[in-house]
Image: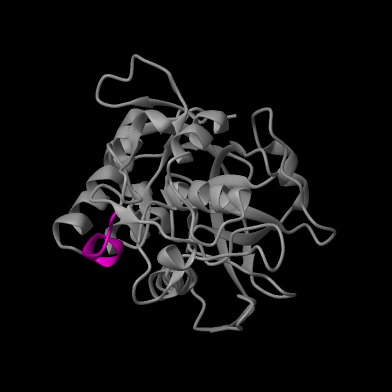
Amino acid sequence: MSMLLIRGKFRVEGGAKPDGDTLPFIPDNVADWKLVPGDGQVVPKADGRAAVRLEGIDALETHYGEKPPHIEHQPLGLAHQAADALLKHLGFDTVLRDDDETVATTPDSVPGWILTRGADAYGRCVAFVGKGTPPVYSGYWTGVDEDLLKRTANHHLLLLGLAYPTFYSGLPVYLRELLTDASEKARASAKGVWAVDKTLHGATVTGMTSLTHELTGAVILPKLFRRLKDYLDFTGNDTPSMACFRAFLAGAQDEYRLLPDGATLFKGLHQIVEVTSDNVVRMTHPSREIVFTEK
């Protein structure tokens, strides 16, 4: 598969809150944003900066929600490890983080490049991100092979076990398989999230604290965390029952296919989430087997 390469710099300043899978990027030529393919459109700020969402991975949330007091996070130790590993891999020397997740770095920007096939519904450019000399000139298309993929921070974070593989339908099979291989190496060594992951084993959900506490909060797939957080906001109950969570998921209408077959299009995560009478929530398939439909 070919992707569009854009050269520029990753810039962290002015209240930026990069996490383990999203950070700001400014092209050397801001007009290059108009070259990004697909129906979605990148929405840059006045200085040309736009958020880049890393393709193929999902890191623990450092801040999820519209605004205080409804912003929540997953256990911050691992969430911050992912965010810091991303920035340091790209060349930032020091990373300082405030309580509100605002980040300051030294230097405040580093050169780099992205490989993209489009933007998401939020105006973020979905991309593989890299440092050093890019493989082609900015604005050109290039094939992404194994060697090039291994140069990206996306692959690096999966090797460290600091992100979950999370795939969408436009990503080619061979790239999914390479990213899965990297993640499986980390899982086999119980690195990062894989030392404590509860996605398949089950997390007892008794309120937000059971998902956010640094010592006792359950580490789960971020997409499942986001759905649980939305459900808890909806119920408005500090000691909720999970009895209606699957019905809530049915209404969310996430669309996906399950590997290795991939023939059936499923609608609603309720079809791969189980809830027991003691408020234990678990997914029945690992994220590497799920391919979400792009919207």
Q: Is 128 in front, or is 219?
A: 219
- Closest to the observer: 59 or 210? 210
- Is 130 rendered above or below residue 200? below
Residue 151 appears at what percent x and percent y? 37, 56
Residue 242 appearing in the image: yes
In front of the other: 291 or 251: 251
Q: Quick check: 10 above or below 283?
A: below
Q: Quadrant of residue 59?
A: bottom left
Whether residue 294 is visible to the viewer of this picture, yes or no, is: no
The residue drawn where x is 35% and y is 60% is 156
Q: Residue furthest right?
A: 46
Query: Is 120 above or below relative to 67?
Result: above
- How many tags in the picture? 0
Q: Is residue 119 left or right of residue 223?
A: right
Q: Is residue 99 left or right of residue 268?
A: right
Specify the segment rendered in magenta: 191-198
> Where is residue 25 shown, x and y percent of the image?
65, 59
Which corner quadrant holds the C terminus? top right
Q: Residue 202 at x, y = what percent?
A: 28, 51
Give the position of the N terminus as an image quadrant.
top left
- Whether residue 13 is situated above or below residue 220 in the rendered picture: below
| Residue appearing at x 68%, y 44% in the figure | 122
Task: Please name the residue shown 56% across and 33% down the image.
Answer: 252
Query: Residue 60 or 25: which is nearer the viewer?
Result: 60
The stretch drawn in magenta includes residue 196 = yes
Q: Residue furthest top?
A: 263
What percent of the width, then of the height, locates residue 13?
Answer: 70, 75
